Amino acid sequence: MFKRENLPAEASIFAVFVGIAVLFEVLGWLFIGKSFLGNVQRLEIIILQVSIFGIIAVGVTQVIITSGIDLSGGAVLALSAMVAASFAQSVDAFAPIFPQFLGLPIIIPIAVGLAVGAACGWINGSITAYTGIPPFIATLGMLVTARAVAVIYTEGQPVYSLSDSFTVIGSGAWPVLVFFVVAVIFHLVLKHTVYGKHTYAIGSNEKAARVAGINVRRHKIMVYTIAGSLSGLAGVVMCARATIAQSGMGTMYELDAISAVVIGGTSLFGGRGRISGTVIGVCILGVITSGFTFLRIDFYYQEIVKGMIIVGAVMLDQRRQAKQRSRA
Amino acid sequence: MNNQDDIILRTDNLTKRYGGVHALEEANFTLKKGEHVAIVGDNGAGKSTFVRQITGVEQPTSGDIFFEGKRVEFNSPLEAREAGIESVFQDLALCNDLDVPSNLFLGREELLFKFGPFSILDEKKMMRKAKEVLERTAIKIPNLSNHVGDMSGGQRQCVAISRSASFASKLIIMDEPTAALGVQETTQVENIIRGLKDQGVPLILISHNLRQVFNLVDKIWVFRRGRIVGEVIASETDGNEIVSMITGMQGGVHEKASYI
Ligand SMILES: Nc1ncnc2c1ncn2[C@@H]1O[C@H](COP(=O)(O)OP(=O)(O)OP(=O)(O)O)[C@@H](O)[C@H]1O
Ligand SMILES: [Mg+2]
């Protein structure tokens, strides 16, 4: 027999996920006489919806493990999407942003989107590492600034007429595939590389990490840059999927991403957490959103429940932390 | 004076101020090759401050540090460590959320495959070496893959000490290594220190335990209110003399003899 403590933390989060899904199934039969899980199309939509902020959440997980925070995900997504899209317009685009850059190979807009995200993340990381401004404030500044730059970039106009070869990466199962690949890569990176070890070390005891010879500043900048790049990637995938880029895209995605990370068991105190937990957290948020819509419950009630779940997850985290402290 | 070649570490007028606090004033300190010395002094005497300057954790306000005859300026603990100075800090400097091997090898991980920051860790090798290191020191830790935060204070201290003892090449500094330990663990740590003496690795030991100091070291340096007030050969002094140097009082020492 195994003891409860020996189960991976993911097992209990996964149990919550299954519990919520089953609950909606039962409620579905009770109140509207339909199956929740039986509808394959609905499950597809859930996965597609969560994939975009899931990509952001993979980066946010790493930032939170260093005991930082990144509030800029949604805004960086929008800015990256706008800039990427402006390099992805088809040759027959009406009033293109850059008439001289039409029909480019898709690698260019993808690289541009990632680079914009990376630049935003690098700024977040540098401010946090060098000025002592808390990451909450630094990334809040980025949230406001990146969104504003996204508006200014096209004077508020959306970017249309994206080339077919570019929009492919947002079509079908592509967003899910991108999310999955990114999640697997960073799950392994956190677990098995020096980068991962140092990320946990910094979140666990920054001073000890420095004393052990880790270049904490450089490492933090790297973590925020990776998070920014992933927000940029989310922006590329999202505008490819929508076949249009708008400066209002991804509003509040940073909150969904942070919620997923916290629900997935990553500690806001730093030092603990896993991408696998985040992936389940992302799925839980997806199922809740979809389940409430399925039960025709108003959007604002959904938000209330989400809010309560997040607070609950943080409370659990605090209790775990307090237990550890009292032992130390 | 000492022969220059014999000296591994020397500080000239080493001074550290924190704003208006004169934590360390013009400390002139020397350590010979293979020598084990203790630094003693009351709380706040500047012992840890001294250690922080020579291990690169902080940079001195003024004064010079010479290591192996060359003037050095360590801008980070890593630089000091690369020069061969290992230290056990008073506040442990372990990561509670990591397991024993990760802590032992933090910042100098064994690698399977080198690729910059994304180098792959050789976890098996680190676990194996961690076992060897801890076996050599006779420290008992039931499960090395437990988080360090879930272990007892004594076990954690043992991890911190084995870490520096196993990597020490030229100098090892321990700031109150047995302060939180039980009798058995204290003995184990003292044995590690004797082992270092046999290997010829020089040691600076900070301790409030005078019995331990007299048992282990060749020479005692006394700090009082940020200043070095004396250096005495351990075999040529006794507890009373040390205590009066620590407190700066000639009389009334006998009530304090409980120090020993
Ligand atoms: N970072 C700091 N900022 C301001 N003052 C400091 C700082 N670190 C140490 N001090 C002060 O410097 C003096 C020396 O402190 P230090 O930690 O070196 O003492 P210590 O001899 O190691 O004492 P203990 O035996 O209690 O460890 C103390 O008065 C302390 O308050
Ligand atoms: Mg001290």
Image (cartoon, helix red, strand yellow):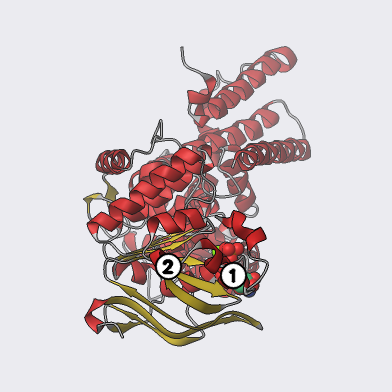
User: Disc 1 versus disc 2: distance between alpha carbons?
Assistant: 48 Å
> Looking at the picture, how far across and down is residue A306, in whole percent?
70, 38
- The residue at which mark 1 appears reads as B244
Q: Is A110 displayed left or right of A62 in the figure?
A: left
Q: Chain of mark 1?
A: B
> Looking at the picture, how far across and down is residue B200, in whole percent?
24, 61
Name the secondary structure under disc 1.
helix
The residue depicted at 51 percent of the width and 40 percent of the height is B182
Nearer to us in this view, B117 or B34: B34
Q: Which mark is residue A28?
A: none
Q: Chain of mark 2?
A: A
| Amino acid at pointer 2 | Arg
The residue depicted at 53 percent of the width and 51 percent of the height is B179
User: What is the crowding at mark 2: few (fewer than 14 residues within 10 Å), some, or many (at least 20)?
Assistant: few
Point out the image quarter for the C terminus of chain A.
Answer: top right
- The residue at which mark 2 appears reads as A218
Name the secondary structure under disc 2.
helix
Nearer to us in this view, B229 or A287: B229
| Amino acid at pointer 1 | Ser
> Looking at the picture, how far across and down is residue A244, in whole percent?
52, 57
* Residue A45 placement: quadrant: top right
The residue depicted at 51 percent of the width and 72 percent of the height is B222
Nearer to us in this view, B74 or B239: B239
Q: Is residue B97 visible?
A: yes
Q: Is residue A157 visible?
A: no
Mark 1 vs mark 2, foreground winner is 1
